[in-house]
Amino acid sequence: MKAHEKQAYLEEYELLKKKGKPFFPYAVMKDSVMALVVVGVIILMSLLLGAEQGPKADPTTTTYVPRPEWYFFFLFEVLRIIKPPELVPLATIGIPTICMVLLLLLPFYDKGPERRPERRPLATTAGILTILAMGYLTYAGAVSGSPTEIDMKVAPQYKAGAEIVAGSGCLACHKLGENGNNGPGPELTHIGARIPRAAIVRSVEIGPSIMPSFRELPPKKLNELADFLSSLN
Amino acid sequence: MPKLSDLLVPAPLRKTPKPGEAGVPKTPAPQDLKSAPPERPGEMGRVGEQALEAPTEALAWIDQRMAASGFLTGMLFRKVPKGTNWFYTLGSAALFAFIVQAVTGVFLAMFYTPSTTQAYSSIAHINNDVFLGQFVHGMHKWGASVMVILVFLHMGRTFFFGAYKYPRELNWVIGVVILILTMTMAFTGYLLPFDQRSYWASIVGININGTGPIVGPYLSDFLRAGPELGATTLSRFYAIHMLLVPGALIALIGAHMYLVVKLGTTAPPWTRIGNTPRVAEPTTELDAGAVSGNGYSPNGSGSTIAGVQIDGHNGGGATA
């Protein structure tokens, strides 16, 4: 925006303002109606939907499906879509950070004097695409299958171990048969054929690299988990 | 160019000049009310009148010390530009959602205990025993979603109306920081009920932070406040959720609103000064200026003289 365009805007704005109405009572009236609607909607949601508590937090649980609140679904979904391990940091922090920086600096790279959306095709298209993408990702995140399902055939003696794997969030990072995310962790479908049982136990306890440690698992569950994983070959 | 405040505030409401300042006050200064009360008949009437005048005097006393009336009348009676519509209520709606969160949050804090052993039972106590407890808890829970939606809608309006452009760039930046802090509030508040849902979602969230490049591991260590998610994590999230971020939010919302009042809200980008919408062709622009009859026509012709055809916004620039 050049100096004369800035000046033109300010002058036009002054005139538009002169032709406008006082903030009180006109804008205040609209704002008050809107405030009542907002409070009314919140009260209604509280009365209809309540605030039921789930079961108490249990770090040793094996069956719980971790889900973020709905407004983080889009982020959750980006994580599921981007699979290659080397790209995971990009998906988790990279893309959101880049988007936030782009959003923050918007007025510093979009400096044109035009304000009508139909005459800013690039900005308007980018804006609509962003909204559609976030809407789609939120929807996909909402309907996506539970990350704790294991569809493969499991022999009865390994059922308990499979449930622990399903409930401990392993599939967030490991592919297991048809389920789970392919990365950042190695695929577990044939893990028993590739590394010995002791190495599996050590990995689960230590949590190498970015993998979280699961040493809070009771020894019995750890054993069942290791039995199940080492049976995969 | 005249002073902005002179354009905004109708003459009877203008701020009285300070003692020793040039210019005759248009309205009687507050101290005049006190030193020279108007003539009044009868002794009884005088007592009544004085009683009636007490609030005015109290306000005058405060105003002499705060000198706020000029600012307040300026703020209340400032003009909002022509064309202002319902889209412009989204910002104040988001503010009201924040106020609901603040008020309900205070009441929840009266009964909540941020410890791993008691958090869950204190929420159960709020839900089951405290008068209107579950109602207030529900308002806080759902109010969070409403606030997130309203902040996004408000940002969408600002984006599509081009309202982030000169001279409101700084207010856009503040707004984006408010958005980030709102999401931080949502993330940190989610752990506090300490049920399965909040516990596991927070672990996932912290681990996601941990995968970030360079600062990621430090950030997740900071959030977790230890090797495992536990008592220290909960109290850290609690402190962030109800001291750090709300403080920053209140300060930034204050700055955001100060700039809104200072710079004024934008008009919708399609609003033009005349009644006919102005289009790019210089002839129509001339017509619009002439028809509107508000003394703005010289600007319209100015643009054609200068021969510049920058669409829509060239009028004033050519004469300036």
Image: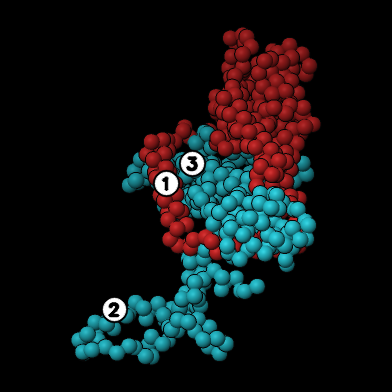
Chain colours: A red, B cyan
Which residue is at 77% across, 32% downward?
A87
Disc 3 to disc 1, how far (Cα)?
A: 28 Å
Q: Does A70 sit above or below residue A148?
A: below
Crowdedness near tag 1: few (<14), some (14–19) or many (≥20) residues, C-alpha within 10 Å: few
Q: Does A16 sit above or below residue B153?
A: below
Image quarter for residue A180? top right
For badge 3, the amino acid type reads: Pro
Dot 2 or dot 3: first in sequence order is 2
For badge 2, the amino acid type reads: Leu
| Front one among B319 and B118 | B319
Residue that label 1 marks: A37
The answer to whether the residues at label 2 and label 3 have Cβ atoms under 8 Å apart is no
Which residue is at 29% across, 90% downward?
B39
Which residue is at 50% across, 81% downward?
B16
Crowdedness near tag 3: few (<14), some (14–19) or many (≥20) residues, C-alpha within 10 Å: many
Please state the horizontal and vertical placement of residue B260, each as a whole percent of the image. 58, 60
Both on one chain, marks 3 and 1? no
Q: Nearer the viewer, mark 3 or mark 1?
A: 1
- Dot 3: element: loop
Please state the horizontal and vertical placement of residue B49, each as a whole percent of the image. 27, 82
- Dot 2: element: helix
Disc 2 to disc 3, how far (Cα)?
A: 52 Å
Q: Tell me, yes or no, if residue B317 can be seen here.
A: no
Residue that label 2 marks: B52
| Front one among B54 and B160 | B160
Q: Does B229 sit above or below residue B289?
A: above
**Chain letter of the residue carrying label 1:** A
For badge 1, the amino acid type reads: Val
Residue that label 3 marks: B193
